[in-house]
Amino acid sequence: MPAGRGQGLSGVAPHPQVPVPALRAGWETGAMMDTTTGRTVVLDVWCELQCPDCRTALADLRALRARYGDALVTRLRHFPLDKHRHSHAAAQAAEEAAAQGQGRRYAEAVLERAEELGRRGEPLLVEVARELGLDAEEMDTALVDGRHMLIVDADQAEGKAIGVTGTPTYVIGGERLDGSRSQEGLRERVEEIADRLLTEGGGAA
């Protein structure tokens, strides 16, 4: 979903080459900051958990994980939008879930209830944690004390610096792909880049 004026309907930003960020772990692991992975291709997904377009993108992300398995690591990067008032809290909650070992499951569970999050806010974030068997009391405390706020703010600042304007936005192989207005053909483009990087035998992102 675009934050303001988008990058156009093509899904590819006009200046696609962006810096490669430091390695973070992916949705398929509990941690989001693990630097020990030996995988060769990284897909950064700039996302916010109150965004219906990001929920739609889950199907593509699951298809990519099914196709590439351990050859592709998908990393959640936070880009909360001001128009979604609970998106910043949801990003912090996702980091707390990651600290408790359920980052991907939690993020996807919240995305599946994006509209409900808009209505209920933080009580839903705690409820989802409880449903997944996480420490719901610790989740509530984390939302109050803001322990993960700096991580979320740093992601958002980095996203703005590389030209992210809406969600979802993908970065792979140094190319930025904007799915905030249209996701048509986006997964195919990700696959083209991933296949090229794997054929070349590397390239961290």
Image (cartoon, helix red, strand yellow):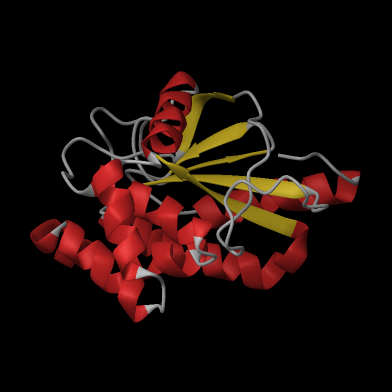
Q: Residue furthest right?
A: 201
Residue shown at the point (35%, 54%) measured from the top left: 93
* Left or right side of 127 for 183: right
Query: Residue 145: x and y, percent?
Result: 29, 43
Query: Residue 35: x and y, percent?
Result: 73, 45
Q: Can residue 44 be seen at all in this image of the molecule? A: yes
* Left or right side of 15 for 124: left
* Left or right side of 1 for 119: left
Query: Residue 157: x and y, percent?
Result: 42, 24
Residue shown at the point (19%, 57%) measured from the top left: 122
Name above or below for residue 137 compared with residue 203. below
Residue shown at the point (38%, 41%) measured from the top left: 147
Q: Nearer the viewer, residue 79 or 121?
A: 121
* Left or right side of 35 for 101: left
Q: Residue furthest left?
A: 119
Q: Can residue 113 be seen at all in this image of the molecule? A: no
Callout count: 0
Residue 152 quadrant: top left
Q: Which part of the image, by quadrant, shows the C terminus?
A: top right
Name above or below for residue 90 compared with residue 69. above
Residue 202 quadrant: top right
Query: Residue 177: x and y, percent?
Result: 51, 39
Q: Nearer the viewer, residue 156 or 20?
A: 156
Residue shown at the point (41%, 72%) measured from the top left: 134
Name above or below for residue 171 compared with residue 66. above
Q: Which part of the image, by quadrant, shows the N terminus?
A: top left
Q: Nearer the viewer, residue 188 or 146?
A: 146
